[in-house]
Amino acid sequence: MYPIVRLRRNRRTQWLRDLTSETKLAAENLILPIFVIEGENQRHEIKTMPGVFRQSIDQVVLTAKEAEKRGLKAIALFPVIDSELKSEFADEAYSLDNLICRTVRTLKNSGLNIGIICDVALDPYTIHGHDGILVDGDVDNDETIEALSNQALVLAKAGVDIVAPSDMMDGRIMAIRDNLDNEGFIHVNILAYAAKYNSSFYGPFRDAVGSNQGKYLCKASYQMDPRNIREALKEIEHDIEEGADMIMIKPGMPYLDVIREASQSFNTHILAYQVSGEYAMLKFAAANGALNWERSILESLTCIKRAGASAIFTYAALEVAELLEK
């Protein structure tokens, strides 16, 4: 009789499990999204995202310092724009003195050695909450591209390291790359939200930045259909051809198959976003005793990493980095 194959031997102790683990999650794999508001010494918890705060610029600096201390390599900034500054054509997005540009400059002058990523999309700045310029009730692709190119250039002038177009317009990566290069910003990276799905998991984020206008806002005419994956691969291919340095897939855990397929199909860096709804589900479930928070957040992020993501946006980045130090 042949001996039993005992695969459990390698699972017998914690050190053996660590030694033989196939996927390693580390702080440098995590990117912390931060919501920025006006004012000083302001830090307001978001009701739909427990443990996540809207922060004034001075508080963002403190949070960024903690992120650097914990081993994170980058943060991502999202502005919460006062309603009186919002407009039909997102005029505030093109101002060098807007909230996000002032935040970038302050962070760059603070002596931090951490990457700064800024979203390129118009939804925080528009009165209607869409990611672009509306024409006859729908987002106009080409007019929006021109606006996004201007927004990306303003962010580059402020000192951002990576611009991240999250709008899902066709052809915007090429336009942004050309505009940045022509203005001398050849070293600014582009993280393209190439496969951003029209997901119901964005609700808490829209609450956080005030872009939901008090109701569900359908973006199905430009964001990806959740039923499709071949279309996502086409989107990724086009963005890489147009000059994207990195690719984002969003949301994260509900789209592990897309992350896996993309990581196997393209020789580029694939990032994923554990979005606000994913974070909120785990947080509220843990608060109600249905889940263990520490185990569930580590498991969810490890699964995203295992699927092929080289880095992950997560609102739990600081908590997870602390857990990984234990």
Image (tube, rainbow, N blue to C red):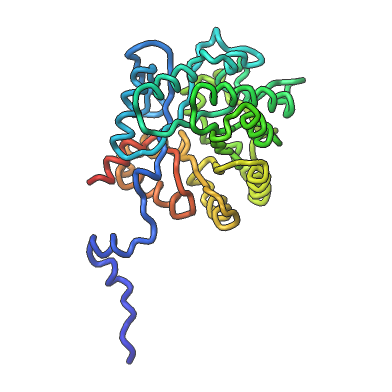
In the displayed orientation, state which residue is furthest to the front.
Answer: 184
- The foreground one among 134 and 288 is 134
- 37 displayed left or right of 137: left
Vertical arrangement, residue 54 with respect to residue 277, above or below: above
Snapshot quadrant of residue 142 = top right
Q: Among all residues in the image, which is located at the extreme right?
A: 136
Count of labels in the image: 0
Which is more toward the observer, 190 or 234?
190
Residue drawn at the location 58% of the way across and 34% of the way down: 186
Quadrant showing the N terminus = bottom left
Residue 280 percent across, percent down from the top left: 41, 34
Residue furthest to the bottom in view is 1
Q: Is residue 260 left or right of residue 283?
A: right
| Relative height, residue 76 to residue 137 (above, below) | below
Residue occupying the point 54% across, 40% down = 250
Q: Quadrant of residue 121?
A: top right
Could you say where residue 76 lies in the image, as x and y percent from the top left? 45, 31
Residue ranking furthest to the top: 84
Front position in the image: 46 or 123? 123
Is 153 placed left or right of 45 in the picture?
Answer: right
Q: Position of residue 78 (x, y in %)?
A: 48, 25
Residue 193 x %, y %: 58, 38
